[in-house]
Image: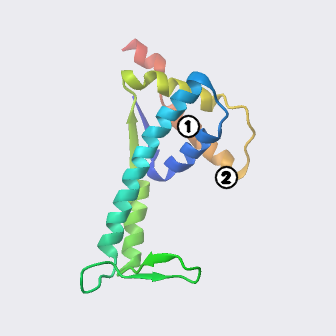
Amino acid sequence: MILVFKNYELKAFGDFLYELALKGKDSRMRSRFIGILEAQLQLIATERDILLQDYAKKDENDEPIRDKDEKGQEFVILEDSLSFNMEVSKLMNEEFIIEVKNEKVEMIKTIQRIVLEVDEEFSGIEAERYNRFCDILETVSFEEMQQK
């Protein structure tokens, strides 16, 4: 059994879980699950930085050329921004798979219950995100696991 997210969904799901008022075991399981998401988000950030280095204009020392915008924010000047954006899009659309193994069953069951039974109202984009999170979590059937 697996949970399949797109990389671009991870931050929103982590933020959603983080905002839920939980205590005890539910809070601990949430923290463990968010830890898994954060590890993947860190990997994504590292891979994006590598892409930035690959597509940056370089100076004579082969260092990325930087500039500042009107607000004083520093940014890297890109050699080919279209290709960079396409590669970042590919990265963000990659699947992140969490295998539901024995050591993760209790955590995933808890996250599934918490999300599917959340007692809040959602509208607009939040409702769409919540629906997507439920769809992902509903793909795991623990009854199926017990039958195997």
For the N terminus, which image quadrant?
Answer: top left
Give the Cα separation between the discs numbered 2 and 1: 15 Å
x 72%, y 43%: residue = 122
- Disc 1 marks a residue whose amino acid type is Asp
Helix, strand or loop at mark 2: helix
x 45%, y 43%: residue = 37
Q: Is residue 52 among what the camera can see?
A: yes
The picture places residue 107, in percent across and down from the top left corner, at: 48, 26
x 52%, y 49%: residue = 11
Query: Which mark is drawn over residue 135?
Result: 1
The picture places residue 31, in percent across and down from the top left corner, at: 52, 34
In the rendered view, tell whether residue 133 sits above or below residue 91. Answer: above
Q: Is residue 111 among what the camera can see?
A: no
x 67%, y 52%: residue = 125
Left or right? Give the position of 146 relative to 28.
Answer: left
Q: How many marks?
A: 2
Please name whichever residue, 16 or 135, is drawn nearer the observer in this view of the structure.
16
Q: Earlier in the sequence, mark 2 or mark 1?
A: 2
- Residue closest to the far top: 147
Helix, strand or loop at mark 1: helix
The residue indicated by pointer 2 is 125
Left or right? Give the position of 72 relative to 56.
Answer: right
The picture places residue 59, in percent across and down from the top left corner, at: 29, 85
- Residue closest to the far left: 61
- Disc 2 marks a residue whose amino acid type is Ile
Query: Which mark is drawn over residue 95?
Result: none
The picture places residue 70, in percent across and down from the top left corner, at: 58, 84
